[in-house]
Amino acid sequence: KMLETGLREAIHCEEIDVVYQPQVDHFGTIVGVEALARWTHRERGPISPGYFIPLAEECNLMIDLGAVIMRRAMMDSHRWPGLKVAVNVSATQLRGGQFIPRLKEMMNETGVSATRIEIEITEGVLLNDDHQTQIILKDLRSMGFTIALDDFGTGYSSLSYLGRYPVDKIKIDRSFVSNLGVDAEADAVIRAIVKLAKALHLNIVAEGVETKQQRSILKQAGCPIIQGFLFSKPVKVEEIDALLAVQV
Ligand code: G
Ligand code: G
Ligand code: MN
Ligand code: NA
C-alpha cells in the first residue's frame, strides 16, 4: 500500500528513470537500444521492475507509467539519430484505450517520428487473438513503428500466430540462450528458431547473452544481433553516448 502511493507519486513527478541496453551485431556495433524502467524509492532505494511493473498493473497505474517511459524514450531518442529505441508495451497499455492517440500526442510533443521507435510486446499479448489487438498492431505499423515479439518461445503456441500478426522482429528469450553450450538440444532449438524467423522474413535478436561461447554459437546459428551482459548491462543515456563515441 505504501509502495503503491510511492509509485503513484513517482509516476506523477516523473521520478521513473529509463536505462538503455544496447543491441549489437557481431562486430560489436550498436544497432539499437532497449529502454528499461528503473525506480529508486526515496526511502527504500531501488525497487526492481520485476516488482513495480506488476504492481503498476495491479493498481491501474500501468497506462500512466507506460506513458512516462514512452515519452522519456522518445526524448532520449533524439540523442541517437542512427538507433532505433525499443520500448516495452504491456497488453494493458495496448488495449487500454487511447494508446494510439496518446502516442500521436507524444510524437507531436517530442518531434519524434514513429520510425525511430520499436514497440516490444510479449507473446501473451497475441494469445487472446482478439481482433482489436490485430487492428492496433496494424495501425502502429502503418504509422511507421516496428513491432518486436519479446521473450519469444516462452509463450504457448509460438508459431500459429506469427503469420497472422504484423510482427517485424523476434527476441529469442534468454532461457534458450542460457542453455547454449550446456545442453545439446539448446543448440538445435536456436537453429530452428533462426530458420523459422528467416523463412518468415523476421529480424532476430538473442537476449541474455552473457558468454563468448553463447555469442559464438549464436553467430554460427545465423543470429545476427545480440543483447546481454556480455556487451553491456542496461545503462544511463550518458553511457550509451560514451559507447557510441568510441565506435567508428
Ligand atoms: O530491467 P529488468 O530486466 O530488471 O526488467 C525486469 C522485467 O520488467 C522484464 O520483464 C522487463 O520486460 C520488465 N520491464 C522493464 N522495463 C519495462 C517497461 O518500461 N515497460 C514494461 N511493460 N515492462 C518493463
Ligand atoms: O523481459 P525483457 O526482455 O524486456 O527484460 C529484459 C531484462 O533482462 C532486463 O531486466 C535486463 O536487466 C535483463 N537482462 C538483460 N541482459 C541480461 C543478461 O545478459 N543476463 C540476464 N540474466 N539478464 C539480462
Ligand atoms: Mn523487452
Ligand atoms: Na525479454
Image: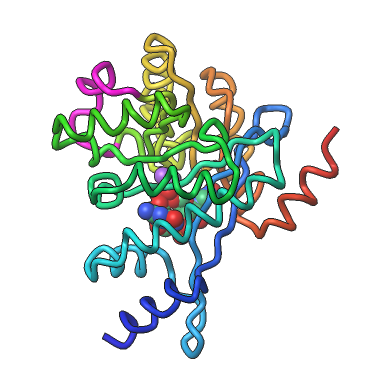
1 vs 176, nearest the viewer:
1
Q: Going by the image, does 228 lie left or right of 122?
A: right
Residue 244 is covered by the magenta coloring: no
Q: Quadrant of ligand 3?
A: top left
The N terminus is located in which quarter?
bottom left
Q: Image point 59% across, 52% down: which residue?
A: 20
Q: Residue 116, relative to residue 63: is it above or below?
A: above
x and y percentages locating residue 221 in the rendered image: 51, 19
Residue 164 is covered by the magenta coloring: yes
Q: Which of the 4 image quadrants contains residue 216? A: top right
Q: Image point 29% across, 69% down: which residue?
A: 55
The residue range painted magenta reads 154-166
Q: Main secondary structure of the magenta part?
A: loop
Q: Going by the image, does 182 lie left or right of 162?
A: right
x and y percentages locating residue 65 in the rendered image: 39, 63
Q: Residue 44, relative to residue 154: is it above or below?
A: below
Q: Image point 56% across, 35% down: which residue?
A: 113
Q: Residue 80, relative to residue 166: is it above or below?
A: below
The C terminus is located in which quarter?
top right
Q: How is the image coloured?
A: rainbow
**Count of numbered badges drawn on the protein:** 0
Q: Going by the image, does 80 lie left or right of 146?
A: right
Q: Image point 54% across, 18% down: which residue?
A: 222
x and y percentages locating residue 32 in the rendered image: 61, 37
